[in-house]
Amino acid sequence: MSFPQTFFRWRPHPWHGLEVGQDPPRVVTAYIEITPYDLVKYEVDKQTGYLMVDRPQRTSSQPPALYGFIPRTFCGPRVGALTPDAKRGDGDPLDICVISERPIDRSEVLLRARVVGGLRCIDRDEADDKIVAVLENDNVWNNVEDISGLPDAIIERLRHYFATYKMIPGQPSELVVKETYGHETAFEVIRASMEDYEMEYGG
């Protein structure tokens, strides 16, 4: 697995300085912020591009998959319009979860991910889609073309995690998982996020 050979004088910003992928929206680059072993939520600082501590997880729930974002995407008005109950996109790069048979326990890594579907989520009136993908050339999941080809237990874990990971005890969750969708809808969301990025930040 290799990425385009680009000469950088310095470390590129993971959101703005990396490519969305070699074959988007089917195969995309994923920048990983959180692994299934993390009990702290890490997030890229939008100004510097360094990984920062966002918050310790309040519950015992752990991420069921690698979690990060697709570079050069932005959840703006086009992404927001794809979710009927949302007023806007959440203003962040498009989130992605990547299923891998072999454990990957390091964050701040890049990988090539093949998109199979997604979760349509709303966080306080904002569209907050979670794209679901498999690690390209994975020995177990490589033949999965659509989210329907993944075990139900994996999807249930993803839905439960995102429905509860922001929950404060005694209060309802701010994020609601509305539905699960397949790869064609995921492609549509990724294309919309790429268009939103170009409108917001330029090509």
Image (cartoon, helix red, strand yellow):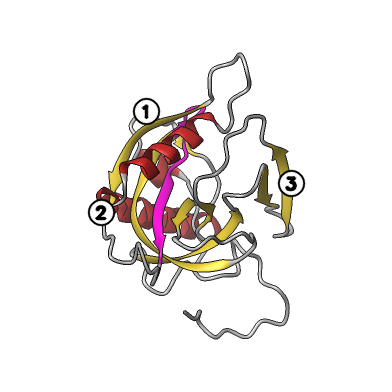
Rounded to the nearest angstrom, the CA distance separating label 1 from label 2 is 20 Å
**Residue 119 picture quarter:** top left
In the displayed structure, would residue 78 be above or below residue 11? above
User: What's the mark number on residue 85?
Assistant: 1
Rounded to the nearest angstrom, the CA distance separating label 2 from label 3 is 34 Å
Q: Amino acid at mark 1?
A: Asp
Q: Earlier in the sequence, mark 1 or mark 2?
A: 1
Q: Position of residue 203 (x, y in %)?
A: 49, 67
Question: Considering the numbered disc 1 on the image, is that residue within a helix, a strand or a loop?
Answer: loop
In the displayed structure, would residue 149 be above or below residue 142? above
User: What's the mark number on residue 53?
Assistant: 3
| Count of number-bearing discs | 3
Part of the protein shown in magenta: 122-135
Question: Considering the numbered disc 2 on the image, is that residue within a helix, a strand or a loop?
Answer: helix
Q: Residue at x 36, y 47 (%)?
A: 118
Q: Earlier in the sequence, mark 2 or mark 3?
A: 3
**Residue 91 picture quarter:** top right
Classify residue 198 as left or right of residue 59.
Answer: left
- Mark 3 or 1, which is nearer the eye? 3
Q: Position of residue 169 (x, y in %)?
A: 63, 18
Q: Residue at x 57, y 49 (%)?
A: 36
Q: Is residue 133 inside the magenta stretch?
A: yes
Q: Circle 2 sits on which residue? A: 184
Classify residue 102 as left or right of residue 57.
Answer: left
Q: Amino acid at mark 3?
A: Val
In the displayed structure, would residue 179 be above or below residue 3? above
Circles 3 and 1 in contact, beta carbons < 8 Å: no
